[in-house]
Every structure is written in structure tokens, then in C-alpha cells.
Amino acid sequence: MATRNEVRFILNGEDQAIRDVGASDTLLDFLRIDRRLTGTKEGCAEGDCGACTVLVGRLTPQGLRYDTVNACIRFLASVDGCHVVTIEHLRGPEGGLHPVQEAMVALHGSQCGFCTPGIVMSLYALWMATATPSVTEIERALQGNLCRCTGYEPIVKAAQAASAGKGQSQDPLNLERNTITKRLSDLRDGARVEVAKGEDRAILPADTADLAKVLEENPEGTIVAGATDVGLWVTKFLRPISPAIHIGHLEELHEIAEDDAAITLGAGVTYSEAALTLIMTWPHLLEYWDRIAGWQVRNMGTIGGNIANGSPIGDTPPALIALDATITLRKGGETRELPLERFFIDYGKQDRAEGEFVERIRIPKPAAGQLHAAYKISKRRDEDISSVAAAFRLTVEDGTITEARIAFGGMAATPKRAAKAEAALTGQSFDEATMMKAAATLPEDFAPLSDWRASAEYRMRAAQNLFRRFWYEKGTDEAVRLETA
Amino acid sequence: MKDELSITGATGEALPHDSAIKHVTGKAEYTDDIREPAGTLHAYLGLSTIAHGKIEALDLSAVKTAPGVIDVIGPADVPADNDCSANGMHDEPIFAETVEFLGQPIFAVVAESRDQARRAAQLAEVKYTELPHATNVMAAREAGYPNVTSPLKLERGDITAMEAAPHRLKGTMVVGGQDHFYLEGQIALAVPGEDEDVVINTSTQHPSEVQHVVAHALGVPSHSVVVNVRRMGGGFGGKETQMNLFCCVAAIAAKKLNRPVKLRPDRDDDMTATGKRHDFVVEYEVGFDDEGRIVAVEGDYFARCGFCSDLSGPVTDRALFHADNAYFYPNVLLRSHPLKTNTVSNTAFRGFGGPQGLIAAERMVEEIAYYLKRDPLEIRKLNFYGGEGRDLTPYHQTVEDNILDRITDELAESASYKERREAVIAWNARGGVIRKGIALTPVKFGISFTATWFNQAGALIHIYADGSIHLNHGGTEMGQGLYTKVAQVVADALQVDAGLVKITKTTTEKVPNTSATAASSGSDLNGMAAKDACDQLIARLRAFAVEKYGIAPEDFRLYANRVHLGDTVVEWDAFIREAYMARVQLSAAGFYKTPKIHWDRESGKGRPFYYFAYGAALSEVSVDTLTGEYRVDRTDILHDVGRSLNPAIDKGQVEGAFIQGMGWLTTEELWWDDKGRLRTHAPSTYKIPLASDRPRVFNVALADWAENREPTIKRSKAVGEPPFMLAVSVLEALGMAVASVADYAECPRLDTPATPERVLMAVERLRGTR
């Protein structure tokens, strides 16, 4: 296997080949400090404010795909083989302001201006992807961008105004699409990439088989997929992650497979990549999915990572546990499969051996009689961590609940099934009284914490009330959602 | 005819922000974007890890030997005074020797790179003797903590009238604080010069104060310290005094090492180590008659001030100044209690205590309305200032310019308040899960610094021989569009296109002894100072024209980029060239001080405010009574900015302030753990509004008929702070939705921030299930 000791990518128009790259070097510091591209700002260094939003283009089997990402938590090593586009690269068809920039000026979309480059990048990505975005789509594109001055109204209006002009086909990024594709293809040499700055090492395995090998060679390594969590280990906790073993670039792990029985997601599938397939199959995930983080983080973060980091407040585990998902773990050439809920042993402890990695997630397809729901409760509606996340899958036949799977996040040290509630439902008639009887068992299975997100009392009450919401939604015509009332 | 032409960028025109194109292209330069001089070092602060205690031993050996470290700076390295207090009270050390809050700076490390300095700062070994701590108002009161500054009492009428009032209600309101969350954090870049000189590029609202505080710490005259600010990435009050610390540390290190030093804390450290909006606990009693007319109000306003005074004196004063909001209190007694706590010292934040005072007034109105089962708007209108003998504030200033009756009537009419309130009540009567609420709340906000001497400003204008104009003034640009507005004032006065007016960075070298750009006063003060400079220049140009062209003074006229000299018309640049050749001084320093104002704090009497700004908002919300989650369905605003200098910028201020106020009252929660550690110290845990939190329908209008009764710049009014408090309408609407579960029998008494948790708990309390 060939090994390459430099990271290669395209920055705006220029080819980059960089040898001194440490595991903890971020794309943002590279842009601002090394390349003095200071249009990209640091607002929080944790992927929440969006002031550092840039586009990263990468080759996929479907072609060149550009995503907004947070440069502050994106590791420099991980842009190998990518096209990084910053605010400095934007221009209009005649070389002046881009239509998004023009609209932002004309509609007074900036005040202090510090968040503005990031907002322009998010709106630019939206503009390329969606010719005439709805207000909801604009808000979704801006979930990962904070503005403290404007109150967003003129920014939303600017997004609408920019889309009225069209011109996407004449956009430089689209015109250069074939050239960039060619240049990125040329960068693909099939080699493993190993770079370092001093002792601080980063490895990009050549493929999944090589990943298994790298992990066997470096069992102490830190697996980095989307870096939306590991990024903070570095930027906030200054923790060493060397050797960082990147998997975000591995095409096999981005695969989404579908057969008659199940949908199987590679562990590197991002929230954004999974969205369409999952929502088509399980429509109840639509609103839930859009409330996971902001757009940039959904573009970076992976479902495998959300599972593997074992957080008690990850949003995908409760939803997937309720759907009876299983995961495949791999070590070297060996694989094993286990139900997702069994992966979570205790706080910070998962059923994953050293050198082992999550390879894929299998979710059985819906069956007749299943009623689904996934609920997220958070202090702020969007881009917030759940106070409580809950997912229900009840199978109801002739008014009787024949099977119940209910999982919670934020209620225990791990994502966890509500075993007592499930038992209380199974075999009973589906009605409000049964649901509330099941809700009453929650304190037997859960003793949630009080913290800055919510008190234990609130978590418990809200969790119990979600049983009532489920009944109202599935069993009555009552409008129980803010969106539909 | 050329007379038909007009200039671009006159006052009243919706000119875009002067930096808008630079903002959207990423070319606007913030302090961290300035190219660092060769050899620049980076400092990082070492922060305390306990809330209260003595430092017994500070072992910095590992810090000093960490990679890249050049030096460590502590109290002994401060050349003169280890103090960065804004007010001269000498109670805010640059480096603490006794720790008074968790996150207090105790040393700084200087290294070749910021990353190295930051990593090294973690390596300090500190031994503390811990002392008991009190982090909130309740704990501080129980522990008998002192005030950080002298409290204020406002008194008028006879408070014993309370006893005779037909109805009396007592209550307590807990009002949360707020982090500024300026997108650009605190930052200072100090470059040492010859002699005692140091130049500091920073992001402060108050360059003169930074200059004075740094000079004080270095023990040098103010003339040795230059402070430059081109723009800030947001301020909101959070950069009024808070930058003093960072500038002092950078300057001390730069002078000690004779190398440029930059200091930029990480967001988490920024939020941990810098002050915020004061949390308040307000204990109130209100007496009123059967109609809901207020007879007497007594209130105690306890504030979490943090470990030192900072601006807590004037902030708690302003809370009392706005404890009446828009309402006449015939008999009133108000007391402030600026309490010390073991938290970071709280500071200025848009509204400066006013919102906390105002919101308690609105709570009292709510109490009366629920008690009497009346529409709160009726109670409001009944109690507005106005009418015989009903125009005196608790601080004995007469309200002369009240326009709230017209504003609220117009808003209620245009936004169909009555019909919609009926519809909301009908909706709730169905008894479903989703409940609605609606509220119309007013704002009256006093404009002027209550420290009277701050109400002065200077400007410096040069006209170069080619006709181009250099504008400088003491105000700072933090996104509010001040630079643009003042440039419009100059363009208008000199009758040239705004594009001819070069806006330049704020620097202590050009205009001395400036006040903070704060208290919404930026355009009022600096606009008038610039106008004064223009008037001086025009007078000289006129005198020159009279002499040279033999025209009457009144035949000299500047208009639309031209100079009209009787029947002769000369291009601006040509005329300026002539004036230069004739040795006319083409530079002028303007000055302004606000007239009429005076304030005697001891007696609690005076006219602290030049005028009042007014506005009203009508908000409608939906609440999910199963989870406490909510959504603002619609907000309509009618706001008074007098005659707007720039309606686009003013509207932007109103919209932005409303959303920021909504954040304060809804999702922005400061949460300290039992060790005194702030746990909501980053956007991951501290939630400011997002685009999707905007009201689903958001109609904002400026009262186009309004004009300032006082001769302010172009009869405009200040706009930065007043609209912040329009968000109270959201809180009260949430309260109404909550109260509906108990058929409005009880005042919902929602404390703030009204997070989904507080809303659900209030629902369950009113339902009797909690």
C-alpha cells in the first residue's frame, strides 16, 4: 500500500500540498493564520455559530458535492482530496458581487458584519441547491448561523431576493464544475495519507480494509468521522487526539443500501446524506431530523459517530433504537452484529473493543400496523441539544398494542428503552388511559439528571406528557403540535 | 437646472451600512484580522477555578517551561496599579490575589503562538484556601453580602397611601441576566512604541476609558496611550468596560517584552470571565383602585452585581428610572440593592438596567389585570402618563413628550388587537393542548447618560484641497450604523454625496476624552458634534465667498455638490481648491453637550433625561402545554425614532433589539452550578435566537409622524436600546397562554427567562398538578 505524506486539496482556485499537518490542526486556523484568508471568522470554535462557514466539495459516486461545514472544527487533514471554498472566492457572473451578496447589501442584511461571511456562505449553498427556497428552507439553511444584530428578518428577505435572480448555471462554481472534478480526480492516488506535525499525527486510510489495518496498528488512535464531537475535544478541551484516524473520506462508509427488509447505512453516512432515504421510509423523522444540530453539522456529523461516541444525549440513538436498528462492529476482518441498545453499556462506556469500529447500521423497514413518532424537546427549537428525546414504535392490531418499542435520550446515562412502559402497553388496548398508565411507569426506569438544559422534574414530566401527545396524534384529531395548530 | 439635483446619502435616506459591501465579501477588517506586526506574541489568561478563596501558592513552573512560552505576567508585573476598574473605585484587579469568582484572571502567559499560550495557561498549579461563596441574589442576601456601590432611593408622594388603597398585591419577580454574545469576542493587540508609548488596536465601545485605564496601570500619562477601533463585531454594552482588562494585559506584556502582544480569549473563557446583564429579583407591592388605577407602588430591586462595582451603580439606578415604564405612580418608593456576589462583575447591556425595572412594572400591570379580570391593555392606558397632575416621574422629571396614547391606539388598530384577543380567548376556550396568548406592551425609555458629564462629544472634520472629506468622531461602530448616520449628517450639512465623506476609525488621537458609545446616545451626541464642525467650516467658507465674490452672506449656499454664490455656481471641489489657495482653514473640531439635563442623586430629583423614546409591540404566541415549547406567531411593532436619520438602519435596530430582547426573556439562560461555575458559557449551551425563532409574521414600522420635541440632530431620536423592551409583549403573551389553563383566574407570574421548562412548570402549577 502506497503512503503519501502530504495533504492535497484545492483552496478556492489553488492547489495545495501540505506536509506539516498535525492531528489537531483545524481548517479555520489554516485559512486565517497560514493563508491569511481572514474573511472566515472564528466566533465560537465549537461549530455552533457558523461564522466560520465554508464550502467543502468532494467527489461522490453521484458527482461533485459541495456542503457547508464549520471550518473551526473541521480538521485540516480531513480536507484531503476536497475543494475548499471560502468567502473570498465568491463572485457574481460579471466578477462583482454574487447575487446573495448583492441582496444582503440591498436589504440591509448586515450590521456588525462579523457573522455575515458565514451567513453569505450558507445562503450561497442554499442558492445553489434550491432555486426558490421557502422561508422554512431558508431558516433550515440558517440553523447553524447565529446573528446577534439583525434579528434575521433582512437576511431571510435577502435569501428570497437572491433566489429571484436565478443565474445558478452561470455561477463560477458551476461553470468550473468539470474542471474541479477533473482536478480532484487527479488528486486521488489510492494512497494512505499519513501526516504529522511533530508527534501529532493524522492518518487517512486508503479504504475500509486499510482502516481495519490502521486501527490494528494504532489501537490507541482516535477515530474521527465528522469531527463534530472530536473537534471540540481539541478546540475546547485541548485534548491530544493523535493519532487521529479519519474515516469521513471513505466512500464505502458513505453507502446507503436498501433491500426488501432493511435499510443499511454505512457508519460514515452524514445526517444530510441519510435524510432523504430515512424520511421517505419513515416520514415521522422529517421534523425530528431537521432539529438535529444546524445544517453545517448535519453535513459533517455522521450517524455512526453519533452512535459510537456513546453520548446520552445523541439524537439518533433513541430514534434508531425504537426502529429496532442493529449495528455491525468490525475489527480487522472480523465483524459482529448487535442490537443498538446493547451497544450502550453505561455513561462513557460502550460495547466496543480496542481497534474495533462501527461499520454500518441496519434498520428494518416499517411493517403493517406500526405507529411511529420521534420527539425532541429542547430549550431552543433548532440547533440545540435535547433536554429529552423520545421515539415510539407501537404495533397496533385491531386496537390492541401487540408490540411496543420506546426509547429515550436525555433521561439516563445512556440512550435507553423504557422497558416498564413497553411492558405496560403490550397486550393492552390503544387508548389514552393505557398510554398514561405506561407513562406513570417512567420513574421506575429513569432517574434523569438536573443540569443547565433542564431539571430532572421537567425531563420526567415532559417525557410522560409525550405519551399523551402520542395518543392525541395517533388516536385523535386534536392539533397538538405548534406546527399544525 | 442643476438645482434639481440632490446629493446621495442625505439624512433620512435609507443608505446601506457604510461597510455593507466589505461585510458580505469578508473584507471588513476586525481586530483579529489586522496583519500582525513581525514578532507579535500572544497572551492568554490563567483563570481561577474556584468561586471564592485565597491563593496560597501559585506554581507556574510548568507554564514557564511549556513550548513556545516567553514569559508569565502577574500582579508584580503591573508597572503602576494592578487595577482596571472603570469607575475609579479601585475594586477590580487586573490579576487577582484573592479570588472572588470562578474564572477570575490570576496571571497571563505570553508565548510565540496563541495555541501555545492557551495550552500553557492550563498548566498552572494553584493552591487555594476556599471560602464560602454566594453566586446569586438569594444566597448573597442570606449571607449578608454588602452592596458593591451605594444604593439609590426614589421617592415621591406618600407611600402610606398604599394602606388606604382599595386593593393591594404583593409579589416577587425573578428576572434573568443575559450574555451579550457579540459574535466577535474580546480582543486586544498592543504594539509598543518609543518612550512610554503604546498603541492598542481593540474592539471597545469606550476607547478613552481604555486609554485612561491602561495609562493608570502602566503609570504613564494618557498621552502615551493610543487606542484605535475601526469596528466591532457587536458590542451591546459588553465592550463598554470589559475590554479594559484585555487591553491592560496586552499593553503590560507588550511594554515589558517590547514586542507586540495580542490577547484573544476563547469563547468559553470570554463568557466565563466577562460581565453580563444583571439578574434581578424584584419585590413589589402595588395598590390600586377598582378601575385598576395605580395608587401606590413600593419596590425593592435586588441585583446580582458580581464581585465588584463596574457599572452596577448606574445600571441599578437606571432600573429604578424605568420602574415606572410608561405609568404614573401617584405615590412611590423604590429602592435599589446592588448586591455583591461571587460571580463575574455584571456590566452594561442594551437597556442598562432599564429592562429589568420596566419588566417589573409590566408584571404589576398584569397582576392588576388578572385580579380585576380586565384586558391588561385597558389597565395600561388608564395608567399612562398624562392628564392633570399625572406627568411627574418618581425622579421628579416631568414627562413632556408622551406619545404613547397615539402609538398604542394606532398599533392596536392596525394589528387588530381587539378582534385577535377575542379570537385567542375563543381558541383557548376549546381547551386543547395548544394554547394561545396575546399582549400589547409599551415602552418609554429615557435618553441621556444619567452621569451628566458623559453627555458630551467631539468630532474632527478635514476637507482636503481636492474636496474630499475626512470624518472622525468619538463614537464607535459596533454594527449599529453610527458611522453611516454621522456621515449622512455631514453629507447633508455640506451638501456633498456621502461617498465623498471618508469614514475613519475611532482613535483617541483625534478626538479626546470621549464617552462610551452607549446609552443609545451615539447619533445624538456625535451627530451634533459633527454638525457643529460642519457649521464652523461652512461659516469660514461663507466668509471667504463673501470676501472673494462680493456677495451677501445669504447668497452663499451649499447645494447638491455645488456652491451657489448668488448667480454663480461652482463645483464643490473647485470651490474648496479656491478656499485652500486663499488660506482658509479647512479643518474643524466640533463639540456638543446635551442641554437641559441635571441630576442630583442624593435627593433623587432632577431631569436626567433630555427626552424619552417610545414604542409598542403586539405579540401573539402559541404554547404547547404538554412540553412548554412555544412559538411566536406574530409580532407587530410601532416605534418612535423621531425623524429618522436613516430608516433602514433604524428599522434594523428595532428588529434586532426586539429579537435580542425576546432571547433574553425566552431561551437565554445563565446557569451556574453549585461550585459557582457558569455552565452556559458557549453557544452550545447558551441559546440566543435563531432565524427560525423569529415571529412567523413580523411587521415593524417606524412612527413616520413622530419627531423629537427637542432640537436633537435633525429631530431624530435614539434607537439602540428602547426597542429591546418591546419583547416584553412576548413574555406577557406566553403568560396569557399559560393562564388560560386555569381560565385566567390567576396571574401566571412567569419569571424569566421563560424557557419551555418554566412555561410547563407554570402550566402545571396553575393546573394544580404541581
Image (tube, coloured by chain):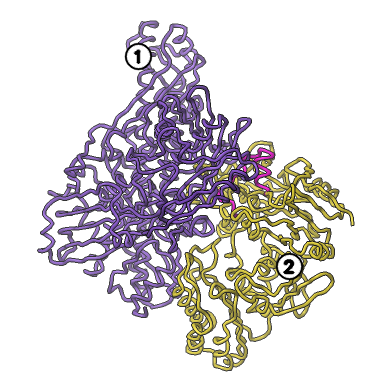
Residue B317 lies left or right of residue B218; in this view the side is left
Relative placement, left or right, of B668 versus B359 is right
Residue B96 at x, y percent in the picture: 43, 46
Residue B221 falls left or right of residue A154: left
Of A223 and B106, the residue lying toward us = B106
Q: Which stretch did the figure color magenta?
A: A26-46
Colour in which the image shows chain B: purple
Q: Main secondary structure of the magenta part?
A: loop
Q: Which residue is mark 2?
A: A267
Q: Which residue is mark 1?
A: B555
Local packing at callout 2 (Cα closer than 10 Å; few below 14, some 14-19, many 20+) is many
Tag 2 subunit: A
Q: Amino acid at mark 2?
A: Ala
Q: For chain A, give the colour.
A: yellow
Q: Give a yes or no on whether discs 2 and 1 share a subunit.
A: no
Q: Please, which chain is the residue tagged with disc 1 on?
A: B
Residue A109 visible in rendering: no
**Residue B205 appearing in the image:** yes
Q: CA distance from mark 2 to mark 1?
A: 81 Å
